[in-house]
């Protein structure tokens, strides 16, 4: 069975179309044109703002014109991650989707259900003639995954409603009414090049097969960080032998726990067998430490050719020490909501840049604004001690829960009416655009819900088929109840 043949047909057909349009973060041109063409094809009013956000408007069902306007909101971009060795151009190629039992998956890449299924749901509402609803707006924002650019720069007067349903959640049976705020901290190391010694053997240590995941939704699971695993090995070796570091590369995105990393380094040829034995023991050690958490961790060591240059000793030692000792993971748990991570930090990516620079990207989150800046300051101080230059992004605010929210009650009642159980009312440690919308439109009453997804922000991303039907029915009934309330 193909994705477009799943039921309910309309939302799955829309999702299938979305997966065929390239839309990595910062490159939403094709998906924007697709949405505009979709609206024009179906005679749906559509407009854009200077940032590239798209807004569609559908008139109310006859007789419900005086109902409040509901805004459905999803983001256009997707996290572009693929497994090593997979040939896929996210700027040109469609996502290769397939049905595996009760799940929809992608071959070797992220699926893009985050937030493609939200886009599909909003599209389906725009063209389904059977729904009963008041006026509905569908807002599609740009570059959510890297900086929430669309929400931060939303055009003045774009929104006309007082109720917003964010379609960017990942757990059936849960309604979210709050989220963490976030900020990125970037460290820059500048190095000098030194000639690679002749009497050294050069090797590449690689870590792969890790689960990775969302740095907000999965940070509490204790999964391994590929950058930390490689840095720990190099640090252990540097305590006994003189290493010449050539290259360090790991992770990709600020909001993804890094699944893969590698480093190229040199060691005196007479010690080559010693370091191979050390790696074998280290791989066993890591496998035991993450038993039951990382079932497919793979650590390898292979000889490479002699490079022309290495990173100077001072910088390479400072980098390895900083990466090994950098904070990563949960910093504190919420005292207000049981089981909710309050504050965390993600050692996201290490990249060799032009002009002899090394870029280390980290991301901090917290539901307490002051603690968000505190952990960002701690990360800054950590890398400053290692001699790096540090800067921060502007960040984004959290979304404080409103337990008296009218739309929360309507959405919860709708779910219980349909499925016979009360949904969980929660806040989420991941960032949503809702806090930024609230800054611009303080009157908004908001909730967020969606179908079940796992492995988001990694090639293990998958979408649970039965929950998409529940998501669609829940959304439709919620719209109807708002219109009749």
Image (tube, grey):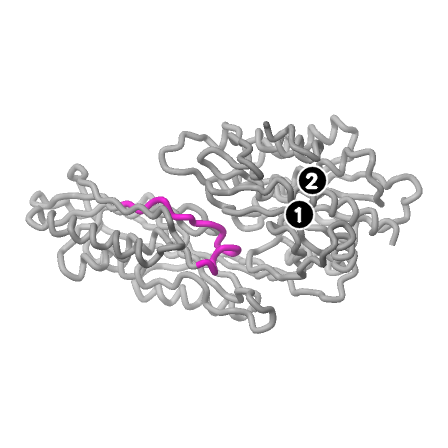
**Relative vertical location of residue 240 with respect to residue 133 in this rendering, above or below:** below
Q: Is residue 249 visible?
A: no
Regarding mark 1 in the picture, which secondary structure is present there?
loop
Q: Which quadrant of the rendered structure holds the N terminus?
A: top right
Spot the residue most to the top.
Answer: 41
| Extent of the magenta region | 206-221
Mark found first going from the N terminus, 1 or 2: 2
Q: Nearer the viewer, residue 297 or 308?
A: 297
Q: Position of residue 108 (x, y in %)?
A: 44, 35
* Separation (CA) of disc 1 from disc 2: 8 Å
Marks 1 and 2: CB-CB under 8 Å? yes
Residue 68: x and y in percent read: 84, 51
Instruction: Classify 10 Å Cα crowding around label 1: few (below 14), some (14-19), many (20 and above).
Output: many
- The image shows residue 143 at horizontal and vertical percentages of 56, 44
Q: Residue at x 43, y 52 (%)?
A: 257
Q: Which residue is mark 2?
A: 121
Number of numbered discs on residues: 2
Question: Does the rendering let one see residue 86?
Answer: yes
Residue 215 lies in the magenta stretch: yes
Q: Residue at x 56, y 73 (%)?
A: 335
In this rendering, position of residue 381 left or right of residue 205: right
Which part of the image, by quadrant, shows the C terminus? bottom right
Categorize mark 2 by other alpha carbons within 10 Å: few (<14), some (14-19), many (20+).
Answer: many
Where does label 1 land, which residue? 167
Please determine whether, in this image, residue 163 is positioned above or below residue 38: below
Q: Nearer the viewer, residue 411 or 5?
A: 5
Task: Residue lying at the far right in this picture: please name it.
Answer: 63
> Where residue 459 sits in the image (x, y, percent)?
46, 40
């Amino acid at each position: 069975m193909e994705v477009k043949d799943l039921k309910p047909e309309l939302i799955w057909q829309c999702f299938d179309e979305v997966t065929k349009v390239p839309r990595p973060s910062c490159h939403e041109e094709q998906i924007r044109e697709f949405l505009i063409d979709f609206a024009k094809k179906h005679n749906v009013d559509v407009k854009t703002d200077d940032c590239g956000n798209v807004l569609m408007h559908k008139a109310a069902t006859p007789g419900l014109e005086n109902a409040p306007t509901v805004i459905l909101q999803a983001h256009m971009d997707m996290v572009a991650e693929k497994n090593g060795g997979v040939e896929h151009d996210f700027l040109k190629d469609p996502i290769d989707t397939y049905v595996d039992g009760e799940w929809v998956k992608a071959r070797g890449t992220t699926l893009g259900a985050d937030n493609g299924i939200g886009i599909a749901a909003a599209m389906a509402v725009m063209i389904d003639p059977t729904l009963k609803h008041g006026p509905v707006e569908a807002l599609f924002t740009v570059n959510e995954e890297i900086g929430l650019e669309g929400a931060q720069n939303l055009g003045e007067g774009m929104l006309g409603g007082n109720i917003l349903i964010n379609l960017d959640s990942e757990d059936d049976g849960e309604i979210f009414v709050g989220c963490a705020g976030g900020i990125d901290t970037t460290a820059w190391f500048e190095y000098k090049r030194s000639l690679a010694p002749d009497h050294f053997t050069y090797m590449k240590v690689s870590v792969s097969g890790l689960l990775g995941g969302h740095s907000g939704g999965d940070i509490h699971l204790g999964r391994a960080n590929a950058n930390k695993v490689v840095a720990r090995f190099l640090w252990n070796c540097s305590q006994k032998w003189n290493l010449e570091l050539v290259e360090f590369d790991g992770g990709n995105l600020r909001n993804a726990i890094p699944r893969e990393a590698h480093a190229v380094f040199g060691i005196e040829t007479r010690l080559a067998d010693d370091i191979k034995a050390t790696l074998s023991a280290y791989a066993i050690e890591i496998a035991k430490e993450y038993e039951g958490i990382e079932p497919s961790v793979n650590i390898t060591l292979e000889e490479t050719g002699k490079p022309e240059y290495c990173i100077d000793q001072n910088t390479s030692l400072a980098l390895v020490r900083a990466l090994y000792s950098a904070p990563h993971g949960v910093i504190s748990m919420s005292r207000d909501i049981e089981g909710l991570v309050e504050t965390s930090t993600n050692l996201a990516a290490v990249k060799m840049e032009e002009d002899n620079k090394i870029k280390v990207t980290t991301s901090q989150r917290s539901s307490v604004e002051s603690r968000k800046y505190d952990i960002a300051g701690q990360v800054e101080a950590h890398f400053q001690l290692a001699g790096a230059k540090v800067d921060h992004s502007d960040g984004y605010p959290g979304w404080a829960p409103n337990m008296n929210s009218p739309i929360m009650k309507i959405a919860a009642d709708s779910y219980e009416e349909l499925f016979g159980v009360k949904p969980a009312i929660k806040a989420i440690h991941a960032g949503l655009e809702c806090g930024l919308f609230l800054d611009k439109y303080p009157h908004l009453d908001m909730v967020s819900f969606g179908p079940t997804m796992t492995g988001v922000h990694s090639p293990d991303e998958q979408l649970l088929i039965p929950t998409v039907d529940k998501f669609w029915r829940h959304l439709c009934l919620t719209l109807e109840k708002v219109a009749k309330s």
